[in-house]
Amino acid sequence: MQSSRLKPQDLQSELRTGDKTRSECFVKKQTKLRTCVACRRKMDQARLNRVVIQDGRLLADAKGTKHGRGAYTCSSLKCLRHGLVRGGFSRSLRRKFAEASPLDLAVAFRAELRMCLGSRKKEALASDSGTSGTEKIGALSFRLSEWESEVAEALKKGGSMMGLT
């Protein structure tokens, strides 16, 4: 009885497409998935906002470069509020912190994202970096637009954001 199995060298030659070998055909770009501390949805890290504790205070970390353990949240005041009130941030960060306002954190995210987006655009214009720079600018723009609408709506309502809805 003859085996119908292919030998590795046969498989390599069969799967060769253009200049790519078999191993190159199956390589996927890995995305870093993170979970929102409030709604528990898993998303790409680039779509979530990072929060860290420094000097006992909760700080927005839009760039993701501040030291320490980080927790992630969606770009919505509702998730920020739930993370603060229900203890999602303290549980995830494994530390207690001074009380923080969701609106203050949202404004901090918005300011950091504006600054980060401006510097990314300057870098992209200076060095024609290609798609990776464009993808980062797109993710930052998306997060900034979400915060812009959330903060504007909250400020119209008068800034009272601690009531759960």
Image (tube, grey):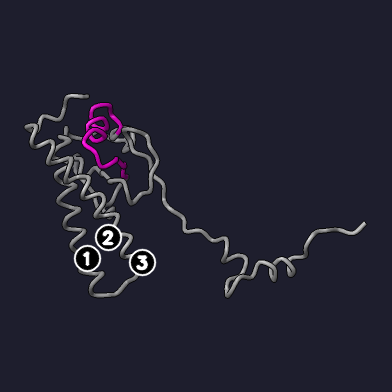
The tag earlier along the polypeptide, 3 or 2, is 3
Left-right relation of 152 to 134 = left
Depth order, front residue of 37/158: 158
Badge 3 density bin: few <14, some 14–19, many ≥20, Cα 10 Å: few
Q: Which of 158 and 99 is in front in this view?
A: 158
Residue 77 % position (x, y): 21, 36
Of the numbered discs in the image, which one, if any, rests on residue 121? 1
Local secondary structure at mark 1? helix
Amino acid type, residue under disc 2 in the picture? Ile
Q: Cβ–Cβ below 8 Å for labels 3 and 2?
A: no
Is tag 2's residue or tag 1's residue first in the polypeptide sequence? 1
Q: Name the residue type under label 1.
A: Lys
Q: Could you classify mark 1 by the number of other residues whose Cα lies within 10 Å: few (under 14), some (14-19), or many (20 or more)?
A: some
* Quarter of the image that includes the N terminus: bottom right
Look at the image and give the residue range highlighted in magenta.
Answer: 70-88
> Which amino acid type corresponds to the residue marked 3 in the rendered image?
Thr
Check whether the beta carbons of the residues at disc 2 and disc 1 lie within 8 A of each other: yes
Residue in the picture at 23% in, 75% down: 126
Whether residue 15 is in magenta: the answer is no
**Which quadrant holds the C terminus?**
top left
Left or right: 82, with 4 as reference point: left
Q: Residue 163: which quarter of the image?
A: top left
Is residue 83 in the magenta section? yes
Q: Name the residue under label 3.
A: 131
* In this picture, residue 50 sits left or right of residue 10: left
3D distance between C-alphas at marks 1 and 3: 13 Å
Q: Is residue 36 left or right of residue 15?
A: left
**Which residue position holds label 2?**
137
* Residue 37 in which image quadrant: top left
Q: In the image as oriented, which residue stretches furthest toward the right?
A: 1
Q: Where is residue 105 in the image (x, y as percent from the top left)?
A: 17, 41
